Image: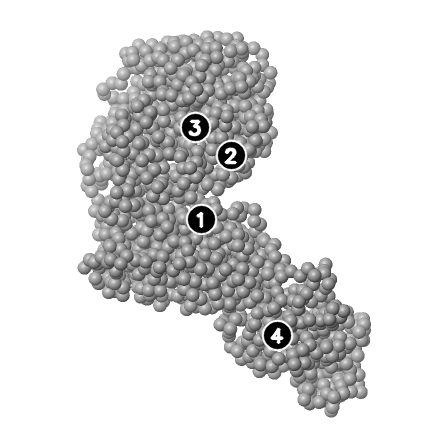
């Protein structure tokens, strides 16, 4: 007979009193608070978390006010029942503390023990206060090493809510300090015991001066762990938290009324029987026949969990557990076998096929072996058994994981590919979603008596509004119980349930579950069995569904005992036994309405479990009186040793061990190393060591018992004696492990493996506060995207003027006067050589200086008007063109004639044939158009008849033609008829300052144009001859180019002098500072691309040698911190690089060399400034930094690049040449005979054979006696990158920056380097590996790589994915050459060019586009603007995108396609989409889907800026939105149509075009000047 006992609590019998509405609100539990409208907090990148919807304010109750008032005066621990509003008391305290003067500049820290509570508590605080609330937990995107953002996040917050371990890490690494905290709130503070992170935080608290310590406020419903020693438990908690446990004293009745306790019941059930009326044989019995070591399954662990589940739930649930655990394991094993087979087919694409994709063969010939893959017999049988039992346990569609088992020796068909079959099987057996059930009805006869008793309880308490929680101990019990309850006939239609478990992992699955670290390698499906934990997102989803009523029952582990927001439950059931007081109190707290019931399930006859519960229940009132009745208890002044009587610890901390613990504080930063943090710091270091998919993650190894030995991974570049540490003897194994980790971190810090913040890396994603040399970077967050700067400018007038002579083809033509001594220069244009030289200082008499300057100003304005701009100039000039005498003095008489008659004279006396083609004249009807006299036709007048075929032949006389074309509304045409006609041609204006440096001249520059100018006929009497000599007006014609060249040279030389740059060639330095906004035929983008590679190498060499004991992952971060855009921007601003950049456009229709409008000549001369205001994107500074390095490298190689880097503030170590700084060891070491042929092929003999051995040693082969190739690979990657880029830069002088980058990426990508390693050097034969899977993978790829031709790998290499080790070993070999040659770059570059000669030979800048670009350009050409890529997850539980689909007009055309990496997935999807959308027979081709209309393609005659500038303006573009895809596609299309330098419209062409529009533009000027005539 089942016995049911009822125990009524006195609390549940208390009378209710009337409450106000606000009091009712306050009385709600945490779950009710969660129902209030509130805005979810954003992640740490958001400045504040605020409430956007109205939230009703809580009103404090009397007992809450009591606790709040006591908390103001001292540190307290509020011991209140669940649902009594402890969190609201903390909010009151937060509001109070932030108003205190001593709290200014400090933050409030709210600590929680679980991740889910961070979201919950942050949202509640945000809804109740206007404070800035930040939240932190391990799943938010803020890395531990990101000091800058940690600091910014704390400084930008008033309250931070975080898990305890995160805050302890922050304190350990000195990102923040205890003395900068005003209040610490510990939620569920009873965890402050032993080595919990709460206790670690408090240990740091006690290290702070008492006057600087923050206030402490603890919250718990169960302050006593051990009821046998209640006073000891309280004292331990108080000692650890430096606080006093208090309870409500004055308003107890109100507390009891608002914190009702449930009715407690005991439900007994019979022990499980030995036999059930169930399947015979069942699933486990059937599988047991095929247990074998040949199948990688942890049978012993499964057997243990099977029996636990069977005893608890019955045979059906035990088999259910086994099925859902084994199904994904078997699917994964089959997946790996099929993957291996597909690779052997030399058909990588077949691996990623689906129904639409098919098996597309590669374009490489080879023999294909279609042999059936070997499958262990036991594995085949287990898979068949699971398939047979699927209908009993799995409600998902039938899987085809065994399709491979039954395939023939023919090639796979699309329907048997892994993506469409096996992967489905793998991903369909993940953790079930809420309310997932089994496919059949589950009779109670298949269930244990315990489940039957549970069913009875649920039926007894079920109502339509029922909410309940069943607490269990193990995850597999929760999962199975949640699956079956809804299908038990008695509960069908009543119970909607799901499991709720913690985040941790279950038992392992052998090597298949070893992490790959995200490395690029073969696709491995990470499988999570049902016994695994739940992710945060799934927890939140489940809780939300329970809160909103979609679920009415949760099967939960201890994760639901405390903190999480739930509705007040009608029923709470302890399905498994209670083990400690805290579990009893916390789980009972979920039943907190007056009508709730708390059911304890106890097996009949199990007196120990019943006695424990009875003891908990009966002792609770007595325990509460311990802290409720104490009057001013004495709190220990400092932390001591925890009570030995506490429950729940498997291993106690020995007092002797605690007494000898040390603390290690870094004086410079305050970072703290403790025994509690040391193991985590070691693990963090090892987690950053790179590894490929075939190598297990490097992990520290601990051995020994009470005197531990720590062995660090051999892949750490440490001396042999620094890889192993022996710790001191301790009294516990755990303490011994902590002690040896503590010693290791101290030693590694001294070796500079850890920095002074005890971090292995500093910064994250280019956000470090320091560069690789530890120099602080300025904060660039306040620098605007568009800079307004003062740029150096030579054009100014000062008290001292300089005379310069303009020479054209060796003849002095005119003078140029300005206030700056301009550099001597020479340029060539249109076959003319123009030069400028400074002669002497120009001095005027003081009394006539202003008059003379006005003459120069008027004269120059007239010349520029006629010869350059075609429009008048109103501002004062800053430079003057003047006529010269034969002694190169200013010809003031000639100037006066122009000033007196600026438009010329009608007096043609003295004009002879010698003036033909030299004299400049002006037609008064078209004033502003300068003409050159060609001939005087005395045989013609205006009344003559035009000859047939001439332009004027449409009219009876020339006069008629002139009158019609020159008449304006404001004036009549002036056409004299008593004078001859003259033949003239237009003087081509030069409105552009565009020129080419001498090293970049084209034929158009070196050769004079011989095209006959367009002739005109005009009346002589309508024209004035001007007073400008031929030399002067020719000087005016070339003036824009002279000014531009002089400006460029002036800025370049000023930069060289003021920044301390080495003697970089003038033209290269000019090019490095020319921004794309200049619209020149050349700018700094090519040099920037080259400089990027230069910067990468020189910083790589520096960090490699500065940090000899840091591994590749650390070095990569150090390099990133030195080459990131943020660092370059900071360094550029520090040195003032913006002062020397050239951003002005070439067109000078509006003359720019003038005095500012608000100044007059006198004030300008008195306050002359060699600067002018300019605006350009801040990104220009970063580009210019790299471009300058590229210019230095082209001028003087690596040595000059080092000098330039030092001047620019880049982390290069020093300017001492590498060969001197890093001279190689004089002693040599022999090269093993194994490498003789390799050296011959490379054309290089090693001085040190040990370097060669290290270069071919894979991390799996590395031991404590020798290093792996990882650091050398890091170096060689940078070397190859620069060598290839220099080759492309020099071979293709007209290629754009984008073309250079694209070609480089093809040459240095993994497949290309792997093909060179195998086909050219045979490095697969030399590679030292100790990994069977990697060796097998390499052997599979070698035949394919050997057959790949260079052009194939360049064009189609993106489709291949050989093991990374093949490309790594080539890079490491090149790195070894650089080191062995004493860092002789040119010698190493020669080796690279030899090794890569066939690749470099076929490499071109006109490569076919990659599939993504091809799809974009094709779509843009077709005019479609509604295409986008869509990411998805092949395994939803991994929370990681690994698949890509192509969506066109909201229709998924291709995908999802899953590959080994997301980039390959996108390429495969784009390639397939391009083919299908263009296929007229495809039902979803673009013509049928798209209604955007055809785009009209217009070829741009000139660019308005570079692609880089456009991207800068739209930094958030992504191809995952239709708008972003269309914009990026348009940019790529524009790149295709943008003219390159050799095909661009040249200066002269633009000038001819300009002339064609002169008449149109001149009409307005004619009207303006009509008054002159």
Describe the element under mark 1 as helix, strand or loop: loop
Select label 3 or label 2 by which is in front: 3
Residue tagged by mark 2?
Answer: 134
* Quarter of image, res 20: top right
State the image coordinates of residue 553 (x, y, percent, origin top left).
42, 24
Structural crowding at the residue carrying mark 1, measured as other residues with C-alpha within 10 Å and reported as few (<14), some (14–19) or many (≥20): many
Q: CB atoms at circles 1 and 3 under 8 Å apart?
A: no
* Quarter of image, res 974: bottom right
Residue tagged by mark 3?
Answer: 207
Residue tagged by mark 4?
Answer: 839
Looking at the image, tell me whether mark 1 or mark 2 is earlier in sequence order: 2
Looking at the image, tell me whether mark 1 or mark 3 is earlier in sequence order: 3
Q: Which mark is residue 771?
A: 1
Describe the element under mark 3 as helix, strand or loop: loop
Q: CA distance from mark 4 to mark 3?
A: 75 Å
State the image coordinates of residue 819 (x, y, percent, origin top left).
65, 67
Above or below: residue 1218 compared with residue 891:
above
The residue located at (63%, 60%) in the rendering is 1172
Select label 4 or label 1 by which is in front: 4
Quadrant in which the N terminus is drawn: top left
Q: CA distance from mark 1 to mark 3?
A: 31 Å
Above or below: residue 1016 compared with residue 474:
below
Describe the element under mark 2 as helix, strand or loop: strand
Q: CB atoms at circles 4 and 3 under 8 Å apart?
A: no
């Amino acid at each position: 007979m089942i016995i049911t006992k009822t125990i009524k609590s006195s609390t549940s019998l208390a009378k209710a009193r009337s409450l106000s509405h606000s009091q009712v609100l306050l009385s709600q539990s945490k779950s009710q608070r969660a129902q209030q409208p509130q805005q979810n907090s954003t992640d740490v990148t958001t400045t504040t978390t605020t409430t956007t919807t109205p939230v009703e304010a809580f009103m404090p109750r009397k007992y809450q006010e009591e606790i709040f008032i006591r908390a103001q005066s001292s540190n307290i621990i509020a011991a209140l029942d669940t649902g009594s509003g402890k969190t609201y008391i903390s909010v009151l305290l937060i509001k109070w503390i932030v108003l205190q003067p001593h709290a200014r500049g400090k933050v409030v820290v709210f600590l929680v023990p679980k991740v889910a509570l961070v979201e919950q508590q942050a949202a509640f605080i945000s809804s109740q206060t206007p404070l800035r609330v930040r939240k932190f937990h391990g799943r938010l995107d803020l890395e531990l090493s990101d000091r800058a953002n940690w600091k910014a996040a704390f400084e930008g917050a008033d309250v931070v809510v975080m898990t305890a371990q995160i805050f302890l890490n922050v304190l350990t690494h000195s990102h923040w300090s205890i003395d900068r905290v005003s209040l610490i709130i510990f939620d569920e503070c009873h965890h402050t015991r032993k080595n919990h992170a709460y206790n670690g935080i408090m240990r740091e608290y006690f290290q702070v001066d008492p006057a600087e310590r923050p206030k402490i406020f603890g919250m718990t419903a169960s302050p006593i762990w051990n009821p046998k020693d209640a006073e000891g438990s309280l004292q331990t908690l108080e000692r650890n938290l430096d606080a006093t446990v208090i309870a409500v004293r004055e308003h107890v009745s109100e507390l009891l009324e608002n914190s009702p306790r449930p009715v407690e019941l005991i439900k007994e059930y019979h022990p499980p029987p030995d036999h059930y009326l169930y399947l015979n044989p069942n699933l486990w019995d059937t599988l047991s026949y095929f247990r074998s070591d040949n199948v990688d399954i942890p049978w012993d662990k499964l057997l243990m969990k099977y029996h636990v589940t069977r005893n608890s739930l019955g045979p059906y649930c035990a088999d259910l557990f086994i099925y859902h655990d084994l199904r994904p394991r078997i699917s994964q094993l089959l997946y790996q076998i099929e993957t291996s087979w597909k690779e052997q087919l030399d058909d990588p694409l077949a691996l990623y096929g689906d129904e639409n994709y098919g098996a597309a063969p590669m374009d490489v010939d080879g023999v294909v072996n279609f042999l059936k893959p070997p499958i262990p017999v036991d594995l085949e049988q287990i898979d068949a058994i699971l398939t047979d039992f699927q209908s009993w346990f799995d409600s998902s569609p039938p899987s085809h994981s065994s399709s491979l088992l039954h395939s023939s020796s023919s090639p796979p068909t699309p329907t048997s590919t892994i993506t469409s079959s096996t992967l489905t099987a793998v991903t369909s057996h993940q953790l079930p979603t809420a309310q997932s059930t089994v496919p059949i009805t589950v009779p109670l006869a298949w269930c244990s008596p315990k489940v039957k008793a549970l069913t009875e309880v649920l039926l007894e308490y079920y109502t339509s509004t029922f909410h309940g929680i069943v607490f269990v101990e193990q995850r597999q019990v929760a999962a199975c119980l949640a699956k079956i309850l809804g299908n038990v006939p008695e509960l069908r239609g009543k119970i909607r349930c799901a499991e709720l478990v913690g985040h941790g992992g279950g038992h392992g699955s052998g090597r298949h579950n070893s992490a790959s670290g995200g490395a690029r390698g073969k696709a491995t499906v990470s499988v999570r069995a049902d016994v695994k934990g739940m992710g945060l997102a799934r927890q939140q989803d489940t809780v939300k569904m329970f809160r909103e009523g979609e679920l009415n029952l949760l099967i939960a582990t201890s994760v639901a005992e405390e903190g999480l927001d739930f509705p007040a439950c009608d029923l709470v059931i302890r399905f498994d036994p209670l083990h400690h007081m805290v579990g009893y109190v916390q789980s009972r707290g979920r039943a907190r309405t007056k009508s709730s019931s708390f059911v304890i399930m106890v097996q009949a006859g199990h007196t120990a479990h019943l006695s424990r519960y009875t003891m908990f229940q009966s002792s609770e009132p007595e325990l509460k009186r311990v802290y409720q009745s104490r009057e001013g208890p004495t709190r220990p002044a400092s932390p001591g040793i925890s009570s030995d009587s506490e429950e729940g610890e498997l291993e106690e901390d020995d007092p002797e061990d605690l007494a000898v613990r040390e603390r290690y504080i870094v004086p410079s930063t305050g970072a703290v190393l403790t025994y509690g943090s040391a193991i985590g710091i070691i693990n963090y270091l090892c987690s950053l060591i790179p590894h490929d998919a075939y190598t297990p993650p490097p992990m520290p190894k601990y051995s020994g018992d009470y005197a531990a030995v720590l062995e660090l991974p051999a892949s750490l570049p440490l001396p042999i004696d620094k890889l192993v540490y022996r710790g001191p003897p301790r009294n516990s194994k755990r303490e011994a492990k902590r002690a040896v980790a503590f010693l290791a971190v101290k030693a590694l810090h001294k070796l500079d493996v850890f920095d002074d913040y005890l971090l292995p890396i500093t910064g994250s994603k280019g956000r470090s506060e320091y560069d690789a040399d530890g120099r602080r970077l300025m904060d660039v967050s306040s620098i605007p995207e568009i800079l307004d700067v003062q740029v150096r400018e030579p054009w100014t007038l000062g008290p001292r003027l300089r005379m310069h002579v303009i020479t054209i083809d060796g003849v002095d033509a005119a003078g140029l006067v300005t206030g700056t001594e301009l550099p001597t220069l020479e340029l060539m244009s249109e076959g003319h050589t123009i030069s400028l030289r400074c002669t002497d200082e120009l001095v005027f008499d003081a009394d006539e200086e202003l008059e003379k300057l006005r003459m120069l100003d008027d004269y120059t304005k007239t010349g520029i008007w006629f010869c350059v701009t075609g429009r008048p100039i109103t501002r004062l000039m800053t430079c003057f063109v003047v006529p010269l005498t034969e002694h190169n003095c200013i010809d003031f008489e000639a100037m006066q004639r122009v000033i007196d008659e600026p438009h010329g004279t009608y007096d043609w006396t003295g004009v002879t044939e010698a003036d033909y083609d030299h004299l400049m004249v002006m037609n008064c009807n078209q004033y502003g158009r300068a003409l050159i006299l060609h001939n005087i036709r005395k045989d013609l007048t205006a009344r003559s008849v035009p000859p047939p075929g001439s332009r004027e032949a449409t009219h009876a006389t020339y006069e008629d033609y002139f009158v019609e074309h020159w008449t304006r509304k404001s004036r009549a045409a002036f056409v004299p008829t008593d004078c001859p006609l003259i033949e003239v041609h237009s003087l081509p204006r030069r409105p552009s300052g565009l020129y080419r440096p001498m090293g970049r001249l084209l034929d158009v520059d070196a050769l004079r144009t011989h095209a006959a100018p367009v002739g005109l006929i005009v009346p002589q009497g309508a024209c004035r001859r001007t007073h400008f000599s031929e030399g002067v007006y020719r000087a005016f014609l070339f003036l824009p180019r002279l000014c531009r060249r002089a400006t460029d040279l002036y800025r370049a030389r000023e930069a060289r002098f003021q920044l301390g740059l080495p003697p970089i060639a003038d033209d290269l330095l000019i090019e490095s500072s020319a921004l794309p906004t200049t619209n020149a035929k050349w700018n700094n983008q090519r040099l920037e691309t080259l400089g990027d590679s230069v910067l990468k190498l020189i910083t790589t060499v520096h960090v490699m040698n500065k940090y000899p004991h840091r591994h590749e992952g650390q070095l990569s971060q150090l390099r990133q911190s030195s080459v990131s855009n943020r660092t370059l921007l900071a360094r550029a601003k520090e040195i003032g690089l913006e002062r020397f950049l050239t951003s002005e456009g070439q067109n000078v229709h509006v003359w720019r060399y003038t005095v500012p409008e608000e100044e007059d000549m006198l004030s300008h001369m008195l306050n002359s400034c060699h600067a002018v205001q300019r605006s350009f994107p801040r990104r220009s500074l970063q580009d210019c930094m790299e471009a300058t390095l590229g210019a230095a490298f082209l001028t003087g190689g690596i040595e000059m690049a080092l000098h330039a880097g030092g001047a620019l503030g880049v982390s290069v170590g020093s300017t001492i040449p590498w060969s001197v700084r890093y001279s190689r060891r004089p002693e040599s070491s022999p090269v093993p005979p194994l490498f003789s042929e390799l050296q011959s092929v490379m054309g290089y003999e090693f001085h040190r054979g040990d370097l060669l051995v290290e270069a071919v040693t894979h991390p799996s082969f590395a031991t404590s006696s020798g290093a792996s190739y990882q650091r050398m690979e890091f170096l060689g990657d940078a070397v190859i990158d620069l060598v290839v880029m220099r080759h492309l830069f020099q071979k293709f002088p007209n290629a754009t920056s984008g073309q250079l980058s694209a070609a480089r990426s093809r040459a240095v990508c993994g497949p290309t380097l792997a093909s060179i390693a195998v086909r050219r050097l045979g490095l697969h034969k030399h590679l030292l590996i100790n990994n069977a899977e990697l060796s097998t993978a390499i052997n599979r790829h070698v035949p394919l790589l050997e057959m790949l031709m260079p052009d194939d790998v360049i064009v189609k290499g993106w489709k291949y994915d050989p093991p990374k080790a093949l490309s790594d070993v080539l890079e490491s070999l090149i790195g070894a050459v650089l080191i062995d040659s004493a860092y002789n770059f040119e010698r190493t570059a020669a080796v690279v060019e030899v090794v890569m000669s066939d690749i470099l030979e076929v490499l071109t800048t006109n490569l076919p586009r990659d599939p993504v670009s091809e799809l974009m350009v094709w779509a843009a050409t077709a005019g479609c603007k509604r295409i986008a890529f869509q990411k998805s997850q092949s395994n939803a539980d991994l929370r990681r995108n690994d698949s890509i689909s192509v969506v066109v007009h909201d229709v998924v055309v291709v995908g999802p396609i899953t590959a080994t990496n997301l980039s390959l997935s996108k390429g495969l999807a784009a390639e397939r989409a391009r083919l299908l959308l263009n296929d007229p027979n495809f039902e979803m081709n673009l013509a049928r889907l798209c209604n955007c209309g055809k785009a009209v393609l217009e070829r741009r005659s000139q660019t308005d800026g570079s692609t880089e500038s456009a991207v800068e303006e739209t930094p958030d573009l992504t191809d995952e939105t239709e708008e972003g895809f269309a914009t990026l596609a348009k940019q790529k299309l524009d790149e295709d149509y943008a003219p390159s330098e050799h095909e661009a419209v040249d200066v002269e062409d633009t000038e001819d075009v300009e002339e064609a529009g002169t008449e149109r533009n001149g009409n307005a000027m004619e009207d303006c000047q009509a008054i002159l005539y």
